[in-house]
Amino acid sequence: MNQRYVIKNIGIVILVVSILGCQQSVKPLHTLIEIENALKAGNLAQVKIWCDSIFELGNPDSLTRIKLKSTIDMADRINADFTLSEPEIDHRLKKEIGEFTSAERGLWEQNNWLEYRIIDGTKHYFKRAVSNLQLILKSRQPILNKDQTSDSQALFCLDHTRKVIGAKSRLGKPVIPVKMTINYRLTVKADAVPDGETIRCWMPWPHENHARQTMVRLLKTVPDSHLIASDSAVQRSVYLEQKAVKGKPVVFDLDFEYVSMAQYFDLSKMSLIPVDTTSEIYKRYTVEQYPQIIFTSEIKHLSDSIVKGASNEAEKVKRIYYWINDHIIWTGALEYSIIPFIPGYVLKNRRGDCGMQTLLFMAMARYQHIPVKWQSGWMMHPNAVNLHDWCEIFYNGIGWIPLDMSFNLQKSENTLEKEFYISGIDAYRMIVNDGIGSKLVPEKLFPRSEPYDFQRGEVEWRGGNLYFNLWDYQMNVEYN
């Protein structure tokens, strides 16, 4: 009997594949199309049961099995992000926000400020729903506070900005070197993998082909045997392997040092040459990049309305930056793998984290024929070390210039200081990625926990991917 299976992209990188000629003795109760619809409807328990029915009755071939496992994996990812019940969310709201009326709560949910999904017939709230609600409510107060960091962090960045601008760095020469020694530890939880099985681990590693990041030196790895991806890799990593031991966590350690520098371009003092539409850079970095950089009708209309009348690429970039700064607030993000189209989510909800804001900026800028590429890794500021995403703009005649969308316009009356992150970046960075969704080295066998970015790491064994809830990560930084 010939059976045709079809499964579409459901939020992680899964290709649309039709599997023909799958031999089976008993017809499964449900097709993959029905399973996909159940997933979209939030019937996650049903999804798992139906997938199991195909495993048990359908005798699917290897490609179909991968699709079924990926579907179950997606259901698990959604469950991992929406962990709070209604009683739990009520308790947290009262603790963090105080008393509220049913009408207020209804408004929060109606506007998706208190984010939830209906899963298996009941409301399940995003694990960061309450802290995000606080940020949203704060942003709607008469005095708008756009900082995604603490006041002390904003002041630190502003002071650092003044030093960068004052270091006569306005033409892009890297300045103010900061040497850092890093310990990065990734710990797989005990019994996440059966005893004796090999755990494959990829950990972030800094690029060396950037003027503002130099003197990268490995100090040690645990275990000793390792593979560092070539600097030509878009997403750079250190690869390690260890055997699982029953009842014990498996620890991977990475110690290294490097020097990071700030960079600033005062575009008013530089000559901008019209973009070369025949160049490889233009052809590669002004196009759509499925599934997250797409020129939807909404993005086209909004982008055109923002840049209307702008005289050059720099003015277009500034206008898009200002619009996102003024209309999109920073909030904690769902895992990217469960958001089918991130820029659309950001526009609908008027919020998003650093990477989500950056993807929206990139989509609007590329539609305006401005070459822009993703860049990410870590922000390494003292007392604020964290995952972070930004991007780079290519100006013909100048080259690649960093832009950090979510660091926003700084609170300063000085225009150069205020607009610093439109054409500059501070010295507290670790560049790991020069693009999104690139293959790791060696290539991963199973779907990644984070299909687009690479900052925390990736882990798997021969039985499948290990999602973020099965391991922890920690970065310690010493400033030399």
Image (cartoon, rainbow, N blue to C red):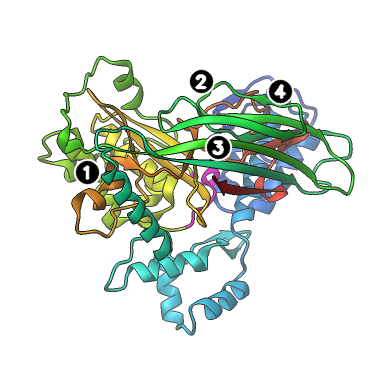
Using residue 120 as the reference point, say whether residue 170 is left or right of it: left
- Above or below — where is 12 with respect to 43? above
Q: Nearer the viewer, mark 2 or mark 4?
A: 2
Label whose residue precedes the other's in the sequence (2 or 1):
2
CA distance for labels 4 and 1: 54 Å
Instruction: Please give the range of residues in magenta.
Output: 332-339
CA distance for labels 2 and 3: 15 Å
Label whose residue precedes the other's in the sequence (1 or 3):
1
Residue at image mark 3:
454
The amino acid pointed to by label 1 is Lys
CA distance for labels 1 and 3: 28 Å
Residue at image mark 4:
22
Q: Nearer the viewer, mark 2 or mark 3?
A: 2
Q: Quadrant of the N terminus?
A: top right
> Measured from the top left, where is residue 177 in percent x and y?
43, 39
CA distance for labels 2 and 1: 31 Å
